[in-house]
Amino acid sequence: AFSEEKIPVDSNVVTFKNFAIKGWNKNPLVIDGIVDAHNISNLLVDLSMKAKNMQIVNSNRATKGADVYGKAFINLDASIKGSMDFMNVKTDLSVLENTNVTYVLPATQNAITQTTNDDMVHFVVFADTAVTESSDSIRKNAMMLALNADLHLLEGCTINVDLSAGGSNKVQVLPSGDLDFTMSPLNGERLTGRVNINSGFVRYTPPFMSEKNFQFQEGSYIAFNGDMMNPVLNVIAIDEVRANVTQSGQNSRLVNFDVKLSVTNTLENMNVAFDLSTDDDITVQNELVSMSPEQRANQAMNLLLYNVYSGAGTKATANIGGNPLFSFLTSQLNTWAANNIKGVDISFGIDQYDRTFDGSTSTTTSYNYRISKSLFNDRFKIMVGGNYSTDADADENFSQNLINDISFEYLLNRSGTMYVRIFRHTGYESILEGEITQTGVGFVLKRKLNSLRELFGIKRD
C-alpha cells in the first residue's frame, strides 16, 4: 500500500519526505530525498530508503502464478546518489528470523522453450542504411554504477526452492551468515562472505529410482572469496537408507544405513566423496570401520543406486527388493501428499524384502511414514515416524512400531539458538541387545564463543 501523501514537485525538483510504502504487516518502507529533473536526460538523484521488520511476502502455494510464496521479513537501509552518468548505491539488507519463503523453480521445458530463438541465422544488408548505424556515429556510454550491497541472513530464517511444480522435489536450507557484494566500473564484481547451512534437506526422486532425501549436516557452509561463480564449498549431507540385513545362521533384521555425501573444494574443481555408516547395528558398523574409505564409498554407491550392500559377513537389500511397482507407488504417494496435504511435510515408503526367521525365509512388506508439522510461527515442531511389517510377529509389536519415532521441539527464541526437545526413538542396537527404545529430554543452546568463559558470563577485570 502506497502512502496517500502527495509528492511535491517544485521547480523540476521532486521531494520525498517520509513517503511510506507499507508491507503486509503495515510496517513501512520510508523514502526520503530528492530527484532533480532540471535536465531530464540526466536526472540527479539523492534518496534514502529504510525499513524495519517489513513483511514483503505473504502468500501460499495455492496463489496462481506465484513464483515466491510463504512469508518474508526484512530490515533495509539503502541510499542512492548520483546522476544517470554515474550512480552510487549502498544497501544493507537483513533477512529476519521469522522468514520462511519458497521460490518455485520454473519448469525445465519452459526454460528451454524461452531460450529457443527462431533467428538462428540473421541476414543483414549492410548497404541498407536504415538498419545499420554509420561507422563514425558516436554511441552514448551506459550509466556507470558503483554498488556496495551487504546481505545478512539471520539465524532462524528458512529458504526453500521447489524443484517441481507440486513441491515433491524440494530444497530447504536454514542459513545464516553475511555477504558483501561490490561492483564498480574499475574493479568489476566481487562477492565475499560466508553462508552457513545450519540444517535443511534436498528431496529428489530421480527417474526409475526411489526418493532420495539428503539431510544437511550442521557445519556445512559456502564461502565466497571474490569470484561469485566459484565459491568454496564444504557441504555434508546424509541420506538414511533402510535395508534388510542377513547373516548366516542369524535372523534377518532391518537396519538404517547413513549414506554420507561430502562436497568440498571450489565449485570449478569440486571434490565429491561418499561414505557409509550406521548407528542402528554395532555388528555392521564394526564391519564398515574395518573397510578402507574407498571400499565404504563403493558400498555407499551400491546401496544408493542399486539398493545392495555386501560386507564380509553380512548382506543387505534396500528398498524395492526386485519389485519396481513399490518404487513407483512410493513416488506417486509422495507426489500426491506434496500436492494435496497442505501445511504438513509427509513422506511414505514401501519396502519388500526376504525375511529370515528361525531358519525359514518369507517375503515381507514394510510400510513406513514420516510426518512433520510446524506450529505457532514455526516455533513448535512435531515429528512422528513409524512402520508396519507383514511378518509373523508384527501384531505383537504393532502398537510400538506404528509410532516408533516421535519428537517435540519448542524454540525458546526466534533465531532457533535455544530450544527444548522431547524424543522417543526405537531402533535395533545389536544381535545381543535387539530392539531398544530411547526416551529423553534435551535442552540445546547454541552460542558463538571466543572462550569458554563467555558461556557462563564470566568477564575478566
Image: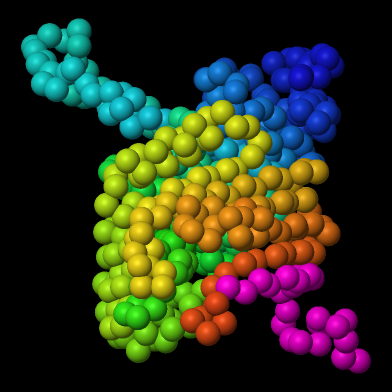
Indicate whether residue 453 is drawn in magenta. yes
Q: In which quarter of the image is the C terminus?
A: bottom right
In the rendered view, tell whether residue 455 sits above or below residue 374.
below
Q: Which of 252 and 175 is in front in this view?
A: 252
Q: Where is residue 413 in the image (x, y as percent from the top left)?
A: 82, 57
Residue 277 screen position, x and y as percent:
43, 75
Q: Is residue 191 visible?
A: no
Please report the residue visible at 35 percent of the width from the left and 44 percent of the height from the top: 327
| Residue 93 screen position, x and y as percent | 66, 47
Residue 212 inside the magenta-drawn segment: no
Q: Is residue 122 left or right of residue 12?
A: left
- In the rendered view, would you say 304 is above or below 30? below
Residue 120, quarter of picture? top left
In magenta, the rendered stretch is 435-461
Q: Which of the 4 quarters of the picture holds residue 305?
A: bottom left
Q: In this view, does 175 lie to the left or right of 261?
A: right
* Quarter in which the N terminus is drawn: top right
The residue lying at 78 percent from left, 70 percent from top is 441
